[in-house]
Image (tube, helix red, strand yellow):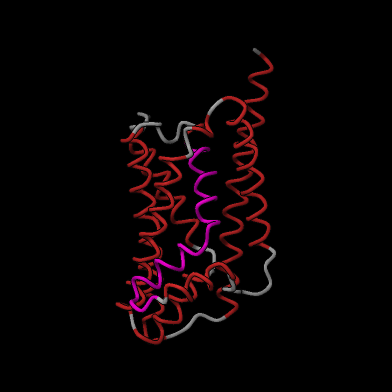
């Protein structure tokens, strides 16, 4: 079976990570669900578009400003361990969640100051007000490059960022369309299932990452 071109691997890595990380029920998803049910697909889709743009900006900052530094020597090893712990911790948090909440003090403070009025800016500001998104992409970007899933070149990074844009946009557009059908809302039970499903996915990624770390340690010990 022929190997996939590196640029395609980078794009798929970005697409899958962007899609998976958009699923947990947070402020953006809840806003899309509420507004889509109340005001229809177009308004909800514009909120999702604004959120996708800010998500891509954070992702680009992570790749261009931090990923290279975190992929060197002992720093690389620390970041690989940190990403493993981070994925497991977030996965467990989502898997064990009992209620869905959109509370975020930082985000609320930024929204109060900027007072977004358009649908696009509502989505944009809601992601911008969550600095944890940037931290998450810094960890993932360093891990993707260290694993050679994304080449440390402009082409490789650009393909991954484009994949993230496609993955996040696909989820938000699909969610906007789903909630706009008949102006219906998802029940708390459905929201919790989405949250737990995302948690299972992140735990699976963390487990795969942990196996890779152990395998590399074994191979290094044999040398």
Point 63% across, 62% down: residue: 94
Q: Give the range drawn in magenta.
A: 116-144
Residue lying at the far top of the rendered structure: 223
Locate residue 212 relative to residue 126 in the image: left or right.
right
Which residue shows up at 39% across the image and 44% down it?
A: 12
- Most foreground residue, 210 or 158: 158
Q: Report the label total.
A: 0
* Figure check: 220 above or below 107: above
Q: Quadrant of residue 47?
A: bottom left
Q: Is residue 16 above or below residue 191?
A: above
Where residue 5 appears, as percent x and y from the top left, is: 33, 32
Residue at 37% in and 81% down: 180
**Magenta span contains residue 124:** yes
Q: Which of 39 and 119 is in front in this view?
A: 119
x, y percent for residue 210: 64, 38
- Asked where in the image residue 167 lies, by quadrant, the reply is bottom left
Position in image of residue 132 (x %, y %): 55, 56
Q: Quadrant of the N terminus?
A: top left
Which is more toward the observer, 136 or 182? 136
Q: Which residue does the image show at 49% across and 48% down from the upper left?
A: 137
Toward which corner of the image does residue 75 lie, by quadrant?
A: top right
């Amino acid at each position: 079976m022929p190997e996939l071109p590196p640029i395609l691997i980078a794009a798929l890595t970005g697409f899958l990570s962007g899609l998976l990380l958009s699923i947990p029920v947070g402020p953006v998803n809840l806003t899309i669900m509420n507004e889509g049910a109340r005001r229809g697909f177009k308004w909800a889709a514009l909120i999702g578009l604004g959120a996708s743009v800010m998500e891509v900006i954070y992702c680009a900052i992570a790749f261009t400003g931090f990923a290279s530094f975190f992929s060197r020597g002992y720093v690389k090893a620390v970041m690989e361990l940190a990403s493993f712990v981070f994925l497991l911790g977030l996965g467990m948090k989502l898997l064990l969640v009992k209620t869905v909440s959109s509370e975020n003090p930082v985000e609320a403070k930024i929204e109060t100051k900027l007072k977004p009025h358009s649908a696009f800016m509502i989505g944009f500001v809601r992601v911008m007000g969550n600095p944890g998104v940037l931290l998450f992409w810094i960890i993932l970007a360093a891990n993707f490059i260290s694993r050679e899933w994304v080449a440390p070149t402009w082409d490789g990074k650009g393909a991954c960022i484009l994949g993230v844009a496609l993955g996040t946009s696909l989820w938000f557009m699909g969610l906007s369309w789903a909630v706009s059908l008949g102006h219906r809302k998802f029940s708390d039970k459905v929201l919790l299932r989405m949250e737990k499903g995302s948690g299972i996915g992140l735990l699976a990624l963390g487990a795969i990452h942990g196996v890779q770390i152990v395998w590399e340690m074994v191979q290094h010990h044999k040398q």
